[in-house]
């Protein structure tokens, strides 16, 4: 297995959605975008995935322009094509349309020398679900703190 190096994660996605399934996809980028990603200048916070004419595109992913790229830099928020098999795309399209799920990029990473995106097939959380998760985390933190002090 090739080594992987995580570039960016979408923490907001885990707060806003339940992740049902995850998928690994490739992404079509130009050279200056890859150089900018290597420097860590990428933001997945508002990114989402749309399917148009049987092809998947990641939308609203911000990659800052490469500082030495001059005329070769592309628009920082342009739609970027995701690379998956047509059959997988059609299956995901069906699940998104029928079950009301959303495709959200969860992380961006290097696998060897290639940039990969981890997609999540997600279901939105309600406000009370978010509160319950936060309360559970706080309770677990308090328990861990109490156990740590008891063991001293």
Image (spheres, rainbow, N blue to C red):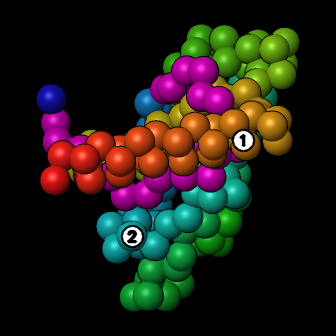
The reply to whether the magenta stretch includes residue 22 is yes
Locate residue 100 relative to residue 59 in the image: left or right: right
Against 83, residue 21 (above or below) is above
Tell me which numbered mark, 2 or 1, is placed earlier along the sequence. 2
- Closer to the eye: label 2 or 1: 1
Q: Which residue is mark 1?
A: 130
Q: Position of residue 87 (x, y in %)?
A: 59, 11
Residue 147 position within the rendered picture, expressed as x and y whole percent measured from the top left:
29, 43
Examine the rendered structure and indicate whether residue 127 appears above or below residue 95. below
Residue 77 is situated, as x and y percent measured from the top left of the image, at: 67, 66
| Callout 1: SS | helix
Q: Circle 2 is placed at which residue position?
A: 40
| Residue neighbourhood size for the residue with mark 1, other residues' Cα within 10 Å, grouped as few (<14), some (14–19), many (≥20) | some
> Quarter-wise, where is residue 4 in the image?
top left
Chain part drawn in magenta: 2-23
Is residue 119 visible in the rendered image? The answer is yes
Asked if residue 58 is among those painted magenta in the image, a careful observer would answer: no
Left/right of residue 36 with respect to residue 83 in the rendered view: left
x then y, percent, for residue 122 = 67, 29
- Crowding at dot 2, Cα within 10 Å, few <14 / some 14-19 / many 20+, comes out as some
Q: Give the Cα separation between the discs numbered 2 and 1.
A: 29 Å
106 or 83: which is nearer to us? 106
């Amino acid at each position: 297995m090739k080594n992987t190096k995580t570039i960016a994660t979408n923490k907001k996605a885990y707060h806003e959605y339940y992740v049902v399934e995850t998928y690994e996809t490739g992404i079509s980028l130009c050279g200056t975008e890859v150089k900018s990603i290597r420097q860590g200048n990428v933001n997945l916070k508002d990114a989402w995935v749309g399917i148009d004419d049987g092809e998947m595109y990641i939308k609203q992913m911000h990659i800052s322009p490469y500082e030495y790229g001059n005329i070769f830099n592309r628009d920082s928020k342009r739609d970027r094509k995701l690379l998956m098999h047509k059959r997988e795309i059609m299956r995901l399209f069906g699940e998104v349309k029928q079950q009301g799920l959303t495709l959200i990029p969860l992380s961006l990473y290097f696998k060897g020398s290639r940039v990969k995106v981890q997609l999540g097939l997600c279901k939105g959380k309600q406000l009370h679900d978010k509160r319950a998760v936060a309360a559970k985390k706080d309770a677990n933190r308090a328990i861990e703190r109490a156990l740590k002090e008891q063991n001293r």
